[in-house]
């Protein structure tokens, strides 16, 4: 897996993270949601004359975003997930494929129910 090395330029990290998610089969809609959020983070950083992404910047972005906008809890969780993925990717932590972490109840060799394992991934058929 290709990881961003020493420098943590938000544009390079965003590009490589989106490429990874695309390779994992994420839908166009989901990729577009990630792209918009990453662009929003980049704008937040540009306004503050920052180019190197850190976890602290992610936290500041989240705090600023939820204090300035009416954001539903579900959207807040989406942003937190993005920031977690961004931090993990930046730090070289391998992305966990949710599909490979599913336990299935099988009937006639078909997965009829995905049960999250201890990593907390959700999946249903």
Image (spheres, rainbow, N blue to C red):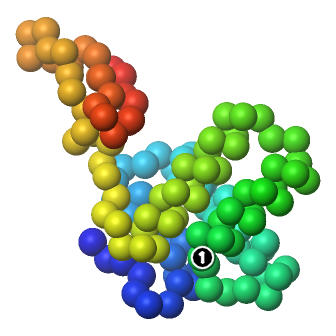
In the rendering, at what x and y percent does residue 27 appear? 47, 46
- Is the residue 73 above or below the residue 68 in the image? above
The residue positioned 50% from the left and 90% from the top of the image is 7
In the rendering, at what x and y percent does residue 84 appear? 52, 57
Q: Can residue 39 be seen in the rendering of this structure?
A: no
- Is the residue 9 above or below the residue 36 in the image? below
For label 1, the residue is: 54
* Residue that extends furthest to the right in the rendered view of this protein: 68
* Residue that extends furthest to the top in the rendered view of this protein: 107
The residue positioned 62% from the left and 85% from the top of the image is 52
Drawn side of residue 21 relative to residue 64, left or right: left
Image quadrant holding the C terminus, namely top left
Q: Nearer the viewer, residue 10 or 110?
A: 10
In the rendering, at what x and y percent does residue 104 appear? 20, 22
- Is the residue 66 above or below the residue 1 in the image? above
Q: Can residue 89 be seen in the rendering of this structure?
A: yes
How many residues crowd mark 1 within 10 Å: few (<14), some (14–19), many (20+)?
Answer: some
In the rendering, at what x and y percent does residue 19 appear? 42, 67
The residue positioned 64% from the left and 50% from the top of the image is 79
- Is the residue 13 above or below the residue 121 in the image? below
Q: Nearer the viewer, residue 106 or 120?
A: 120
Image quadrant holding the N terminus, namely bottom left
The residue positioned 56% from the left and 55% from the top of the image is 82
Drawn side of residue 28 relative to residue 60, left or right: left
Q: Secondary structure at mark 1?
A: loop
Q: Nearer the viewer, residue 4 or 91?
A: 91
């Amino acid at each position: 897996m290709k990881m961003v090395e020493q420098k943590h330029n938000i544009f390079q990290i965003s590009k490589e993270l989106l490429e990874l998610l695309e390779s994992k089969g994420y839908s166009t809609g989901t990729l577009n949601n990630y792209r918009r959020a990453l662009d929003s983070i980049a704008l937040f950083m540009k306004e503050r004359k920052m180019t190197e992404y850190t976890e602290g910047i992610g936290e500041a972005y989240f705090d600023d975003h939820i204090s300035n906008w009416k954001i539903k809890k579900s959207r807040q969780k989406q942003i937190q997930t993005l920031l977690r993925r961004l931090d993990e990717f930046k730090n070289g932590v391998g992305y966990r494929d949710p599909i490979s972490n599913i336990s299935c109840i099988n009937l006639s060799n078909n997965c009829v129910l995905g049960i999250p394992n201890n990593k907390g991934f959700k999946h249903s058929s």
